[in-house]
Image (tube, coloured by chain):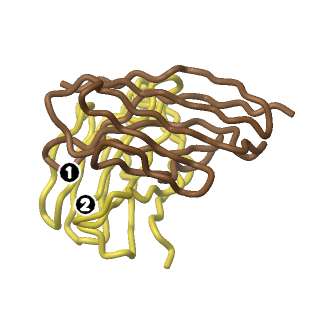
Chain colours: A yellow, B brown
Amino acid sequence: NAGVTQTPKFRVLKTGQSMTLLCAQDMNHEYMYWYRQDPGMGLRLIHYSVGEGTTAKGEVPDGYNVSRLKKQNFLLGLESAAPSQTSVYFCASRRLAGDEQFFGPGTRLTVL
Amino acid sequence: GQSLEQPSEVTAVEGAIVQINCTYQTSGFYGLSWYQQHDGGAPTFLSYNGLDGLEETGRFSSFLSRSDSYGYLLLQELQMKDSASYFCAILANSGYALNFGKGTSLLVTP
């Protein structure tokens, strides 16, 4: 099993550009999450999904949109990137009754 | 809302024991988790306390006291590879989302 994978691993955007980050998991987990991590801020939840076709806002959702059209995939979109969105983005998944969240390797995004 | 407090940095000597504390404020939650993250890497799960008391997994133990709004991670027989950031996290009452503390950077010295 590959676990949780994220595409791309690195990306540089200019202000105003758009992009989509892809997260995929092959563990048949129901729950999926998007976090951002900034120095000294820990992990902050952007959006999450408790099942295919459902999404919910986390702590810092502004400027991001998500979709979960298939159970195994969770997409994070930035419609108009801003320098404040420069961060490391982690995707995670968890099974319905599980204690453990499994994290992907992260996407390092720089917005100039 | 929820808030979690942990020390920002801890230094300890190889072979020693170190305790990383986590205090929290919340109206209710399912349990307290701990995650480890090495520089440049993904967070990895260490432990979960759904009930008060001590959970032991090898060299690592975690403790929760709901009455004191407090938990800790105990690392024994420290090794150099334990140098990493450690995060406590609360599983919210919804049962869906984890809220993380800002993390404790542990440096193990020879």
Give the residue at mark 1.
B96
Residue type marked 2? Tyr
Image mark for residue A31: 2
Residue type marked 1? Tyr
Look at the image and tell me in which quarter the C terminus of chain B lies.
Answer: top right
Q: Which residue is painted at 39% across and 67% down in the image?
A: A24
Instruction: Please give left or right for residue B19 compared with residue A87 in the image.
Output: right
Q: Position of residue B70 (x, y in %)?
A: 35, 28
- Where residue A78 sits, quadrant-wise, is top left
What is the chain identity of the residue bearing mark 2? A
- Where residue A84 sits, quadrant-wise, is top left
Relative to residue A9, is residue A95 depicted above or below? below
For disc 1, the neighbor class at 10 Å (few under 14, some 14 to 19, many from 20) is some
Image mark for residue A68: none
Q: Which residue is painted at 51% across and 22% down in the image?
A: A40
Q: Which residue is painted at 38% across and 50% down in the image?
A: B48
